[in-house]
Each structure stands twice: as structure tokens, then as C-alpha cells.
Amino acid sequence: MKPLAKILIIAGSDSSGGAGIQADIKTVTALGCYAMTAVTAITAQNTTGVKSIVAIPPKEIANQVLFTIKDIKPDAIKIGMLHSVDVIKNVINCLKKIRTKKIVLDPVMIAKGGAKLINNKAIEVLEKKLIKQSFLITPNIPEAEVLSKMKINTQEDMIYAGSILINKGAKNVLIKGGHLKSRFVRDVLINKKEIKIFKNKRIESKNTHGTGCTLSSAITTYLACGKTINKACELGIKYVNQAIGSNMNYGEGHGPINHLTSVSLNKGFK
């Protein structure tokens, strides 16, 4: 098949392949689109945690973005791990040179194992400047708590935190509800026109490494293909749930999900 759209991914690398830019590439590809990348950091990690992080110089991140888009124009952009003020400022400058409004920001702050991936000053710049540049931001509950400066314990708290982020300049906010303990996971999409709740039965699994990266990339892909914000979120959540449900069980810690859940091989490749 011919790719349906072109996606530029700006994010950090995960050596274990479950999260970060590796998960992004797999997601975009599995959903039928073409992935381009700008790597912001190299991490040594596996399912049990992060061993080390090496930052890519901001100028080289900008070089990756600008030289890539000079040749192949993206239909949408997904932004993940941005670890410093200089990186965020460089990315903002790059975005001004790209003609697409379909920008999805996943404000990655803490790895699944608890390692902090961004400093406080960078969070402040992201909050004040980059959120406004994005069409959609997709924080999980701990990230939404940092950005809204409030504690989130209920669905109502999620809605209120989302409204705070809208008032700070976000156009659309999808707060992922997986961190709240309940039989059902409720993800809340908020903008100035409506509040939409996506309710799905919780899938019990320790293999959830990379779910946030995967969801934001899936939504970006669907947006690039022309889906509405509501439909893109609905289909992205469905894809992630099916990927979790495969329960591959790789590794000793939080294992990866199955990005190939959407793919069936042509007979000629079996």
C-alpha cells in the first residue's frame, strides 16, 4: 500500500523499542503512514527503567527538522520528549517554518519507571510557549497535574485541569485517565466548544510501556489522514487498547505493547 500521509516526529529515542521515537515510528507505519524523525535525546533503557540520557545539541535537532522538511513536507507533526529550554525554543522556531497546523504535543516529563526526563525551567517554557503552538496536547494525569498546578483525583478534576490548560492557550486537551484507579479508564477531551469522555474497560496488564507515545502518534496519524479531533482520539485510543490487549509480555518490567495489532501480512510475505 502507498502511505496515506507523512508524519514528522520530534522525540527522544528508547533503546528498548517500546516507547519514544521507536514506538512513534512503529505506530505511524502500522497505521499506514510515512514517518520522518528528529531525535532529541538518546536513552539507554529497558522495561525496568532508564540507565542514562544523552541530549542531542539543540542546533542538531533543528538541522534534522529543517533539512528533512525542506525535501519532504509533513502533513502533521508529533512532538514528544523535549528535555531543555534551548531545545524547546529551537523546536518552536522550526515550527514557524512548517506549514501545518496539525501539531500534537505529548508533554513527556517522567518515564514509566519514574525517571525525570525534563527540568523545571523547560516545563515552564513548554507551558508558556509551546502549548499555544499545538493543535492538541495529550498529558497523562501526573503531567496534567504539573501543567495545571492542581491535584487530580476524579474525572471532574480532569475536566477542571483541562479547562485551566485551555485558558493557558491550549486549543484541545486530551487528559489520559489511566492513572486513576477504576474498572473503566476515562480519557477526557476538552476544548472551548465541548467536553468529550472516552470510556473504556481497563485492560489489566503490566505491559504498558510506551502507551502515551503510541497514543499521541496514533492520533497525529489519524489527524494527518483527515479525521476530526474527536474521531482521531477515538480511533487512537482503540488502537492502543488493542495493542495492550495483545499482552506480548517481553522483558522483566513494564513490557511494550504490540504495535503490529493493526497489521495483517500479505500472503506473499508469510
Image: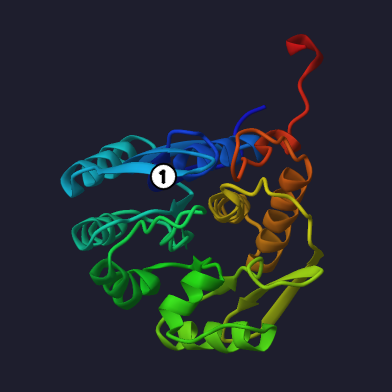
Of residues 265 and 228, the one drawn nearer to the viewer in this rendering: 265
Picture colour scheme: rainbow
Under mark 1, the amino acid is Val
Any part of residue 116 in sight? yes
Say if 15 sits above or below 80 in the image: above
Say if 246 sits above or below 188 in the image: above
Q: Characterize the local packing of mark 1: few (<14), some (14-19) or many (20 or more) Cα atoms within 10 angstroms.
A: many
Choose top left, top right, bottom left or bottom right for residue 190: bottom right
Q: Say whether residue 157 is left or right of residue 25.
A: right
- What x and y, as percent, mark residue 93? 23, 59
Q: Residue at x 45, y 89 (%)?
A: 167
Choose top left, top right, bottom left or bottom right for residue 56: top left
Say if 64 sits above or below 125 in the image: above
Q: Quarter of the image for the C terminus: give it.
A: top right
Q: Say whether residue 268 is left or right of residue 5.
A: right
- What x and y, as percent, mark residue 192? 56, 86
Any part of residue 73 in sight? no
Q: Residue at x 29, y 56 (%)?
A: 83
Say which residue label 1 marks: 50
Q: Say whether residue 245 is left or right of residue 158.
A: right
Choose top left, top right, bottom left or bottom right for residue 91: bottom left
- SS for callout 1: strand
How many numbered callouts? Answer: 1
- What x and y, as percent, mark residue 182? 77, 72
Say if 36 sits above or below 83 in the image: above
Of residues 212 and 168, the one drawn nearer to the viewer in this rendering: 212
Q: Say whether residue 220 is left or right of residue 72.
A: right
Q: Quarter of the image for the N terminus: give it.
A: top right
Of residues 98 and 138, the one drawn nearer to the viewer in this rendering: 138
